[in-house]
């Protein structure tokens, strides 16, 4: 009985990884269709937040449950016990500061070849944020961008998908594949290359420190920096 259960759980690993990829691709095509329709003037950002919580809760709940059924300690799987929270934050800040010149260079390089403005962002969530006029409308978006997305995306992409791909195909193919997938789900052509580089840097930081808290910190700070810049730009206008 234990052997059968072990085999079933072992088969679930590539199935869950494939399911995650399928969900991301499905979401990508759904986003492609949505870009053909202009955004409504008023969007309930709280409903947007709840939808994201449901979406990621369903995905991550399944992944984390499967790992627990296999007897893994989640803190060990994701390296949460490798570094203290304070050290993880300090590492995240330091590595992001070092990575910013490379990310900015990638952004300007992409903008040069695509003839776009590197200071603008046409992602749907950014448009919603810019159209929001009150703090009550903006808070759910800030929470989604700075807290929920970094935690959920790092658990899914770096913590789980990269780990499974690395096990079956090696570190470099896993790094490239997760970076490509991470870039394309944001569905913004001018940021594809910068997001690819950013994802690679997140993965390298995870490999270097062994703690998923480090790329989570980098991700959250990067999103926070962008939101701060957008808020400042809107006030200046």
Image (cartoon, grey):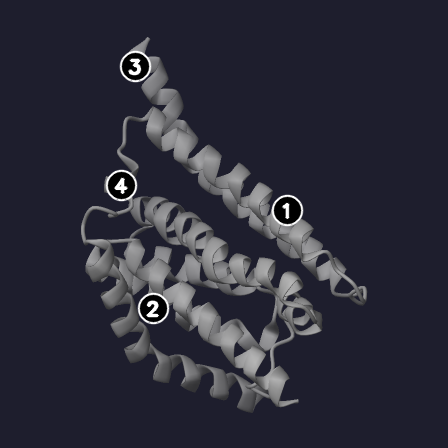
Q: Is the N terminus in the top left, top right, bottom left or bottom right quadrant?
A: top left
Query: Can see residue 145?
Result: yes
| Front tag of 1 and 3 | 1
Depth check: give the residue in front, 175 or 220.
220
Percent x, y for residue 199? Answer: 40, 65
Mark drawn on residue 201: 2
**Residue at image x 64%, y 61%?**
136
Residue that numbered label 3 is attached to: 3
Mark closer to the chain start, 1 or 4: 1
| Distance Cα–Cα, label 4 vs label 2 | 22 Å
Q: Please name the residue that numbered disc 1 is placed on.
A: 51
User: Mark 3: which secondary structure?
Assistant: helix
Q: Which of marks 3 and 2 is in front?
A: 2
- Give the mark nearest the N terminus, 3 or 2: 3
Which mark, residue 75? 4
Quadrant of the rendered structure where residue 164 is?
top left
**Helix, strand, or loop for circle 4?**
helix
Name which quarter of the figure residue 86 lies in.
bottom left
């Amino acid at each position: 009985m234990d052997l059968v259960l072990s085999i079933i759980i072992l088969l679930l690993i590539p199935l869950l990884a494939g399911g995650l990829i399928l969900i991301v691709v499905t979401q990508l095509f759904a986003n492609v269709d949505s870009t053909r329709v202009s955004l409504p003037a008023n969007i309930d950002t709280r409903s947007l937040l709840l939808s994201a919580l449901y979406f990621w809760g369903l995905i991550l709940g399944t992944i984390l449950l499967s790992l627990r059924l296999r007897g893994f300690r989640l803190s060990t799987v994701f390296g949460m016990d490798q570094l203290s929270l304070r050290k993880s934050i300090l590492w995240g800040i330091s590595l992001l500061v070092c990575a910013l010149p490379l990310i900015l260079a990638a952004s300007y390089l992409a903008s040069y070849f695509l003839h776009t403005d590197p200071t603008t962002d046409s992602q749907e969530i950014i448009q919603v944020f810019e159209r929001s006029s009150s703090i009550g409308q903006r808070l759910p978006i800030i929470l989604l961008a700075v807290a929920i997305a970094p935690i959920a995306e790092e658990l899914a992409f770096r913590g789980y998908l990269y780990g499974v791909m690395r096990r079956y195909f090696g570190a470099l193919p896993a790094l490239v594949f997760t970076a490509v997938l991470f870039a394309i789900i944001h569905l913004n052509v001018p940021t594809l290359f910068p997001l690819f580089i950013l994802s690679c840097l997140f993965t390298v930081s995870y490999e270097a420190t062994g703690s998923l808290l480090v790329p989570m910190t980098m991700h959250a700070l990067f999103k926070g920096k962008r939101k701060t810049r957008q808020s400042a730009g809107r006030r200046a206008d």
